[in-house]
Amino acid sequence: MTKMKENKQDQDFQQNPDPKKQPETAAGGAPEGGEPKVEELDRDCLVELSKALREENSQLIAEQEQLKKELEEQKAKYKRAEKIVSQATDVSNLYQRLQVDFDNYRKRNAEITAKAKEEAECRVALKVVPVLDSFLRALDSVRDPADRAGLEQIVRQFEDALREIGVERMEALGKPFDLNEHDAVMTAPTTEPEKDDTVANVVANGYRYGDKVIKHAQVIVHKLQS
């Protein structure tokens, strides 16, 4: 009987040499017939928490990369917009400079055109006025009314044509002598003080283009005799 008991203890010792050590846990993490240990539960929670943190971290990294990408795109758009604004400013400044240059060109061209027109009209007038003066002298010598009427009509036509281009005959007879308008070809004595230095007679008419004298009148000037 005693021998059978010892054999039983030897068998149990071989199966579980450390009587203080608990049996191995069954599949599922808990000893057969018992609850899971606290350490094993904490380990599982840490695994799950670590997994969740990794997933959340991966999501945050992905979001960060997306935000970074969007930021780079916005920077690129801003740079393009800034470049467009700069180009638009340059174009605007260039347009303004061109507008100023064109206005100056138009003014210069208008001045050149006006001056050329004035010079051309003056040249034409200077060729015409001697003919008009000839008709005026002829008119002074004609006494026949019919002949005078014909000459007067010709004189009016000449004067009208000259007036259309801005040329007019200056009235000199009896006017005070003016070096800006008159050329004195000779003097005529006078005893009347009020006639001193006035035009006594017109030898050749003077003409004005607008405010500009284009042909001085040749005159005889009164000189007071003491």
Image: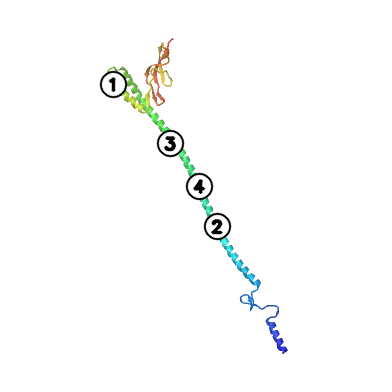
Q: What residue type is labelled 2?
A: Leu
Q: Please name the residue that numbered disc 4 is placed on.
A: 85
Mark toward the start of the polypeptide (1 vs 4):
4
> Outermost residue toward the left?
146
Q: What residue type is labelled 4?
A: Val
> Outermost residue toward the right?
2
User: Which element is circle 1 on?
Assistant: helix
User: Which element is circle 3 on?
Assistant: helix
Question: Closest to the observer: 222 or 20?
Answer: 20
Q: Which of marks 4 and 2 is in front?
A: 2
Q: Please name the residue that numbered disc 1 is placed on.
A: 149
Mark toward the start of the polypeptide (4 vs 2):
2
Q: Please name the residue that numbered disc 3 is placed on.
A: 106
Mark toward the start of the polypeptide (1 vs 2):
2
User: Which element is circle 4 on?
Assistant: helix
Q: What residue type is labelled 3?
A: Arg
Dot 4, how many residues are within 10 Å of its Cα: few (below 14), some (14-19), or many (20+)?
Answer: few
Residue at 35 percent across and 24 percent down: it is 129
Q: Which amino acid does label 1 sit on?
A: Ala
